[in-house]
């Protein structure tokens, strides 16, 4: 008997933390967690099984196909935009070949189960590429099919994997004699910059937002690597988890597209600085733009249009700007770094 599970790759990453905690709190989901790094001790008891391994290890993935009945895959593993620019070919292997391995696994599982496995794929605003700052500021809320000329390896990888998801959903082996009937049910979400109270991101280019906040709370000085006027859309982590779960649950018939923008609020680095300073008046924050990272952020939209997600599957964030900082980020981060007095 194969064990029915939900597979989460990149389980130890930022979204993985939030997703595992949420799924475990619902009680009825058996989680098979996979990560190349050891899983955080706090997450271990929440998972049915944790496997430390690589999504490029096809033998390992073959073993998973044989042992488990995988209902849904949350494929979270990836190398983020800044890190990917230092090792673009490695990023391509992990982000594209790794995703291809998971899509193949999903097809095999769908065939064997006789039903479509759901494949939830977090894509990103990095899939967009606006040619210059002026265009970015005039573009307004960018829709899913606009400005898709990413300038980073990570962005190219995300956009291409969205296409792969569409291919594996609709056209997989379309000319084969034994043309496979059971394809997969791919659902992609283009996330804005994410901010979590529990984890600090590594290797991204929207990281200046969460880094400013976490450094301020720990009293460490922070030099923000973008200009104060830099604007990006952001979202609090509980909303990112909510979006993934809500899209997973949505009836296929209500979905008019395979990839959706979602967003919560959009603000400048200066506005983040002001909010952080108000909460942590001692914070030592300076602005020291890194020209290349700045150029990446300048190519990402200042805001995105998530009307399709709102219309098709009822997306609506719980945390607007004020609630995100006042009710979630600041109190949780304050608590996280407070040393208990004995
Ligand atoms: C990154 O900065 O690479 C990510 C993203 C925007 O997808 N946070």
Image (cartoon, rainbow, N blue to C red):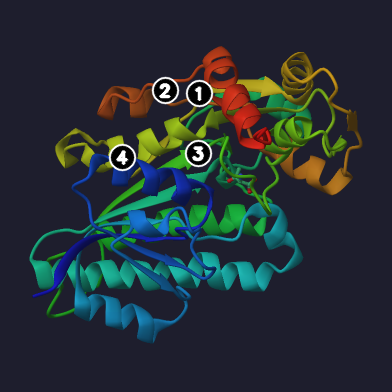
Q: How many marks?
A: 4
Q: Nearer the viewer, residue 90 or 327?
A: 327
CA distance for labels 2 and 1: 6 Å
For the residues labelled 1 and 3, the Cα–Cα distance comes to 10 Å
Residue in view at x 31 percent, y 39 percent: 245
Residue 6, by quadrant, is: bottom left
The residue that disc 3 covers is 191
Q: Earlier in the sequence, mark 4 or mark 1?
A: 4
Of the numbered discs 1 and 3, the one sitting upstream in the chain is 3
The CA distance from mark 3 to mark 4 is 14 Å
* Contact? badges 4 and 1 (CB < 8 Å): no
* Secondary element at image label 2: loop
Q: Is mark 3 within 8 Å of ligand 1?
A: yes
Label 3, label 2: how many angstroms apart (C-alpha)? 12 Å
> Label 2, label 4: how many angstroms apart (C-alpha)?
13 Å
Mark sitting on residue 317: 2
Residue name at image x 53 percent, y 48 percent? 14
């Amino acid at each position: 008997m194969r064990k029915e599970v939900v597979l989460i790759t990149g389980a130890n990453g930022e979204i993985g933390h939030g997703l595992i905690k949420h799924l475990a709190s619902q009680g009825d989901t058996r989680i098979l967690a996979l990560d190349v790094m050891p899983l955080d001790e706090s997450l271990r008891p929440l998972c049915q099984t944790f496997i430390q391994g690589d999504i490029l290890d096809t033998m390992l993935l073959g073993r998973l196909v044989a042992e488990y009945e995988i209902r849904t895959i949350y494929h979270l593993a990836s190398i983020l935009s800044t890190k990917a620019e230092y090792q673009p070919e490695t990023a391509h292997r992990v982000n594209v070949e790794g995703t291809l391995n998971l899509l193949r696994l999903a097809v095999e599982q769908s065939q064997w189960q006789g039903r479509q496995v759901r494949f939830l794929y977090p894509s990103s605003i990095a899939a967009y590429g606006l040619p210059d700052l002026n265009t970015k500021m005039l573009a307004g809320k960018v829709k899913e099919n606009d400005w898709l000329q990413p300038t980073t390896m990570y962005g190219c990888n995300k956009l291409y994997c969205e296409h792969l998801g569409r291919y594996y959903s609709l056209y997989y082996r379309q000319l084969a004699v034994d043309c496979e009937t059971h394809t997969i049910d791919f659902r992609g979400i283009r996330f804005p910059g994410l901010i979590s109270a529990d984890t600090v991101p590594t290797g991204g280019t929207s990281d200046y937002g969460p880094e400013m906040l976490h450094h301020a709370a720990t009293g460490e000085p922070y030099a923000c690597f973008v200009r104060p006027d830099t604007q990006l859309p952001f979202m609090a982590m509980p909303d990112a988890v909510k979006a993934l779960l809500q899209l997973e649950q949505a009836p296929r018939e209500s979905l008019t597209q395979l990839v959706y923008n979602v967003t919560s609020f959009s603000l400048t680095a200066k506005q983040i600085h002001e909010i952080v300073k108000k909460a942590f008046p001692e914070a030592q924050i300076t602005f020291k733009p890194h020209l290349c990272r700045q150029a990446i952020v300048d190519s990402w939209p200042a805001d995105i249009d998530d009307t399709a997600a709102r219309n098709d599957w009822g997306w609506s964030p719980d945390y607007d700007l004020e609630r995100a900082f006042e009710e979630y980020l600041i109190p949780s981060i304050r608590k996280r770094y407070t040393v208990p007095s004995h």
